Image: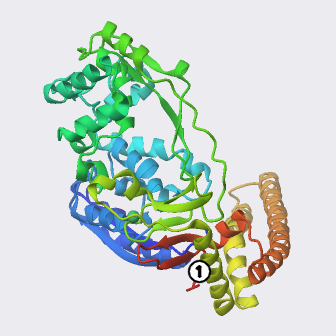
Amino acid sequence: MNHSFKVGLYIRLSRDDGNIESESIVSQRSLLNQYVKENNYGVVEEYVDDGFTGTNFDRPSFKRMIKDIEFGKIDMVITKDMSRLGRDYIGTGELIEKYFPSKNVRYIAINDGIDTFIDNTNNDIAPFKAIMNDMYAKDISKKVKTSLHSRMKEGLYVSGRCPFGYKKDPINKNHLIINEKQAEIVRLIFDFALKGKTYHFIAQELTKRNIKTPASYYNYVWNAKCLSQEYGIWVDTTIKAILTNRIYVGDIVQGKTKKINYKLKKIVKNNPIDYIIVENTHEAIIDRDLFNYVQTLLPKNVKRPEKKRTYLFDGLLYCGDCKHRIMIRYQNKTGRSYTICDYYRTYYKYHVCTTHTNNYEELESVILDKIKEVCKINLDKNQLKYFIENIKIENNTMKINKQMDSLKLENNKLTETLDKNYVNMLNGMIDKEQYIRISDSIKKEITNNELRISHLKNENNELSIIDNKQVEKYIEKVLSLENPTREFVMNLVEKIYIYQNKTIEIIFAFKNVT
Ligand SMILES: [Zn+2]
């Protein structure tokens, strides 16, 4: 984690939690503070929602936290456990699985052992914890028996969000009924498709007609800054999603996605064979024959041609003014490559940003010079060594030390038990035979633990030896900075902001380097 985090602490207390002392604001705060102190994190903000339920996200401090994430004020959120974040499975899941990763925000739930930036088996159980927190808030006895999967098979609509064009039946929330206002838009889209119009054409046409986008109907708080909401712009992918969704003929297709990768990757798509499809579960908006016919008209998935060129700083360039990505485009005519703000490129009609055009080759050499300069001024060899060692070894060492600590603690306890066992024998509570048997097994356990501790110690030493060599090589490279590779640059630099006025701001991946 070559990054010093800007931490936000989130604390929530509601009446559903009863009078449990461990849930009190004071005890949550002290737990969080102890944790950040132990881990040396810098706390930027504390967010406290006192007296707010976890079953929704309509809480003032929570909203403020989301705002701060949007503005980059914090990039790490810590709570006592997941239920503090929320007790609504869908919402909390969205937050942890999609929203936080999309903003590159690290999330830690201390008591649940969840850290979204560390590959940890605890993260795999996060969804289940979220479900459990959800159940706590709702009717427990009813929910325990029915798994999500079997409910899908029954044709119940179990997603949190309603598909565009439908709303949840007020009598049965797992049943969909038509939302006439939105259904009209769906029919309009199919009409266009029937006339052979492209996704792009349809999207533009709807935008022109000022028709509300699906996204604008869902006001999840953390989507508040979502572009499509601000501008009501229809995008091709939305049109495609609607035109290919069988929900509109009355079928429910669920289980399209599975296991989540917490390391910043999106949800994995399921094989279509594994989809759970139940037909005619609700009223259709589009006639089945018509739908099938439209499918034959839709453009086939065309594979994108592979990118021919690779650029040293590709993926690191960001627009300094609007913070979106800067793309690099090769121009056949001139044989040169140019930068352009992607936000500007996509929505130039709406004047959301400016071009940010630069000749890429020139830009690259300017940035390289800048990096060299900064390296020379700020980094002496020892300092650099310290930074890199810190970053590379920190995580592994921390893990190993934790394991060793817990083994030592266990041995202390075992020794205590051993003493007690002796006293018990003296008191006549157990006979000598029992004493020997119990003592032997405890001693065995202690020896095993000691063995494991010494293994871990070796592991720790080896780790630092290997890394030291790597670090030395790395330092040589940094100080010379000749023909850097992309991988090397990625390790050194986190982001490069390009401003319209040609200012360049380089965010280094090392701590304290300015
Ligand atoms: Zn821009």
User: What amino acid type should be assigned to the residue bearing mark 1?
Assistant: Lys
Which residue is drawn at the image coordinates 41% and 77% (left, top)?
501
Residue in front for this viewpoint, 154 or 454: 154
- Point out residue 364 in the picture as x, y percentages from the top left corner: 62, 71
64 to 472, vertically: above or below = above
Res 23 visible: yes
Residue in front for this viewpoint, 11 or 156: 156
Classify 10 Å Cα crowding around label 1: few (below 14), some (14-19), many (20 and above). Answer: some
- Point out residue 239 in the picture as x, y percentages from the top left corner: 34, 31
**Ligand 1: which quarter?**
bottom left
Residue extending furthest top?
Answer: 289
* Residue matched to label 1: 511
- Point out residue 496 in the picture as x, y percentages from the top left corner: 53, 71
**Quarter-wise, where is residue 240 in the image?**
top left
Which residue is drawn at the image coordinates 53% and 53% (left, top)?
264
55 to 115, vertically: above or below = above
Which residue is drawn at the image coordinates 41% and 45% (left, top)?
130
Left or right of 6 on screen, residue 405 = right
**Quarter-wise, where is residue 193 in the image?**
top left
- Point out residue 201 in the picture as x, y percentages from the top left corner: 32, 33
Residue in front for this viewpoint, 171 or 239: 239
Left or right of 76 on screen, residue 250 = left
Which residue is drawn at the image coordinates 41% and 70% (left, top)?
74
Left or right of 242 on screen, residue 42 = right
416 to 284, vertically: above or below = below
